[in-house]
Image (tube, rainbow, N blue to C red):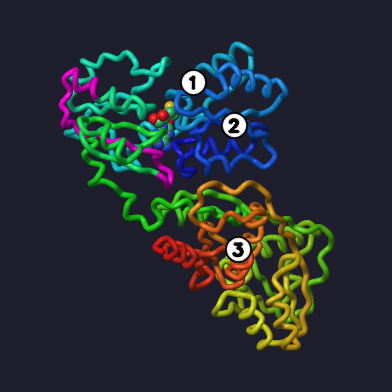
């Protein structure tokens, strides 16, 4: 299965679907870290990472691992960077499986050979500039330049040459092409770690590429593009102006709620890693009667969903609430209620517990709070202070999801205090001082301060657009 070139947004829908059901995932070094976060919690992870021509785990052994897990009846995903059949040895592994009589399928991937130039603004063909493309390895089995028809390649005008695995041999390669007669002024580019936040692109000419790469210390993985299209990189660079371009951002909310936020951050140019720090679990047991209240307060989308799940479980009906007023802490919760056919009668101007409490206390009557177990005391403390008549029913529980923190993060985005605590729990020694915490509100920011974050940014209001705005502000600092 192809994982795409790096950015998790560039894996295919089919890959994502299959990954969700994997028992065991055998993956390479080039698989994006954001893609790896989609491996299910319970699945076995086998890292057979290869680097620059060295094969820490020999091919034979990789095949043995695949056969072994398959024979145990497991659903095994062999995850490879880019496309599995383009310089990925996918064919060899398929042959080994076929020989052993093990059924398999292939999921093509978005190859780095096309996607990495595209991310850098280089179309591999372009009317009037290039009408053909060759994708070539610049690395032979023995380590040197492969035996290619360099004279033939040098003659190609109006073609694009894309070299993979070309960092080590870049100098020899460019020289060989020039010796064979290719114009030293042919546009050329090298793109390192394409589609990730750490992408770097150098552009120049065939004659200067090696020196440029050395000067900028380009290291693998990188792609070399030689041909007239390389000259378009500057003009078509579409990522430089994106406000979060070049940043690695962790989205920490539960997976099922991460989608929209991830998308908005990606739209702004970030490399997004979904790193859910908390998971929610609907509590079991019987719900108390819901009748006889003047106000019912909801503080989260999860709470709304949990209520309906529990009512359905008990074959009960929302009409129990009768004519009680419905209060929501903010627009997302209000929208979840609206989708369940409940119009919201009160939503505070500032979307937090304190303002919800103040508004409810002002309205008075018997109140029912439907929320998380161990919900924030802010809401209830204030109601108690105001002498409000309220009861509270915990609908769901939040627990931390422990995993190792993604490396090299620039930013983490938090939509609740519990996601902050869950994040911190993944790094008991700290070590995230350099990570900017972008928080949805003051409660969350307070939790970030307590957890030891040093750079904290708070959204102007508790909404996703404002949160993304705060991330953009954080990026500029
Ligand atoms: N099957 C892969 C290619 C594997 S060969 C694919 O289809 O993309 C490994 C080479 O791919 C690397 O040496 C490098 O040249 C290229 N490569 C893979 N991912 C890359 C990335 N994100 N940025 C730059 N080059 C990459």
Q: Is residue 295 above or below residue 79?
A: below
Distance between the alpha carbons at the discs numbered 1 and 3 = 45 Å
Where in the figure is residue 162, as x and y percent of width and height? 31, 28
Residue wearing tag 2: 47
Q: Is residue 194 magenta?
A: yes
Tell me residue 351's x, y (percent): 57, 74
145 left or right of 291 in image: left
Ligand 1 lies in which image quarter? top left
Q: Nearer the viewer, residue 453 or 104?
A: 453
Point out the image quarter for the C terminus: bottom left
For label 1, the crowd category at 10 Å Cα-Cα, with few meaning under 14, some 14 to 19 and many 20 or more, is few
Residue in the image at 64% along x and 36% along y:
21
Crowding at dot 3, Cα within 10 Å, few <14 / some 14-19 / many 20+, comes out as some
Q: Residue at x 40, y 52 (%)?
A: 269
Secondary structure category for the residue under label 2: strand
Q: Secondary structure at mark 3?
A: loop
Q: Earlier in the sequence, mark 1 or mark 2?
A: 2
Q: Which residue is mark 1?
A: 89
Q: Upstream in the sequence, badge 1 or badge 3? A: 1
Q: Is residue 141 magenta?
A: no
Does the residue tagged 1 have its C-beta within 8 Å of any atom of ligand 1?
no
């Amino acid at each position: 299965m192809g994982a795409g070139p790096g950015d998790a947004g560039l894996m295919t829908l089919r890959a994502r679907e299959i990954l969700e059901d994997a028992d065991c995932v055998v993956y390479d070094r080039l698989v994006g870290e954001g893609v790896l976060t989609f491996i299910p919690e319970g699945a076995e992870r086998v890292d057979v990472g290869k680097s620059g021509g060295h094969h820490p785990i020999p091919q034979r052994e990789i095949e043995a691992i695949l056969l072994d897990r398959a024979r145990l009846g497991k659903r095994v995903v062999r995850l490879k960077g880019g496309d599995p059949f383009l310089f990925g040895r996918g064919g060899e592994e398929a042959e080994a499986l076929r020989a052993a009589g093990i059924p398999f399928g292939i999921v093509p991937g978005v190859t780095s050979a096309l996607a990495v130039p595209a991310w850098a603004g280089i179309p591999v063909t372009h009317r009037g500039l290039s009408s053909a493309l060759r994708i070539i390895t610049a690395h032979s089995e023995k380590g040197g330049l492969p035996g290619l028809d360099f004279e033939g390649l040098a003659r190609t005008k109006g073609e694009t040459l894309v070299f993979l695995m070309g960092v080590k041999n870049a100098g020899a390669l460019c020289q060989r092409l020039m010796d064979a007669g290719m114009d030293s002024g042919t546009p050329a580019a090298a793109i390192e770690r394409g589609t990730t936040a750490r992408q770097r692109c150098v552009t120049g000419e065939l004659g200067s590429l090696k020196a440029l790469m050395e000067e900028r210390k380009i290291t693998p993985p990188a792609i070399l593009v030689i041909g007239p299209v390389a000259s378009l990189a500057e003009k078509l660079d579409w990522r430089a102006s994106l406000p979060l371009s070049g940043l690695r951002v962790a989205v920490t909310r539960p997976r099922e709620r991460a989608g929209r936020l991830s998308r908005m951050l990606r739209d702004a140019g970030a490399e997004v890693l979904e790193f859910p720090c908390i998971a929610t679990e609907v509590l079991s047991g019987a719900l108390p009667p819901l009748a006889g209240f003047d106000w019912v307060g909801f503080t989260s989308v999860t709470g709304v969903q949990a209520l309906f799940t529990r009512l359905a479980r008990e074959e009960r009906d929302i009409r129990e609430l009768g004519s009680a007023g419905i209060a929501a802490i903010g627009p997302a919760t209000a929208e979840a209620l609206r989708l369940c056919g409940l119009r919201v009668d009160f939503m505070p101007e500032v979307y937090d517990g304190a303002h919800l409490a103040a508004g409810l206390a002002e309205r008075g009557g018997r109140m029912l709070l439907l929320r998380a177990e161990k919900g924030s005391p802010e809401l209830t403390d204030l109601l108690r202070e105001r002498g409000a008549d309220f009861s509270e029913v915990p609908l769901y529980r939040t627990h931390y999801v422990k995993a190792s923190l993604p490396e090299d993060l620039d930013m983490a985005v938090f939509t609740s205090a519990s996601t902050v605590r869950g994040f911190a729990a993944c790094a008991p020694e700290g070590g995230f001082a350099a990570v900017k915490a972008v928080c949805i509100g003051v409660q969350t920011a307070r939790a970030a301060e307590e957890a030891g974050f040093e750079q904290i940014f708070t959204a102007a209001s508790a909404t996703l657009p404002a949160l993304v705005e705060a991330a953009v502000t954080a990026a500029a600092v």
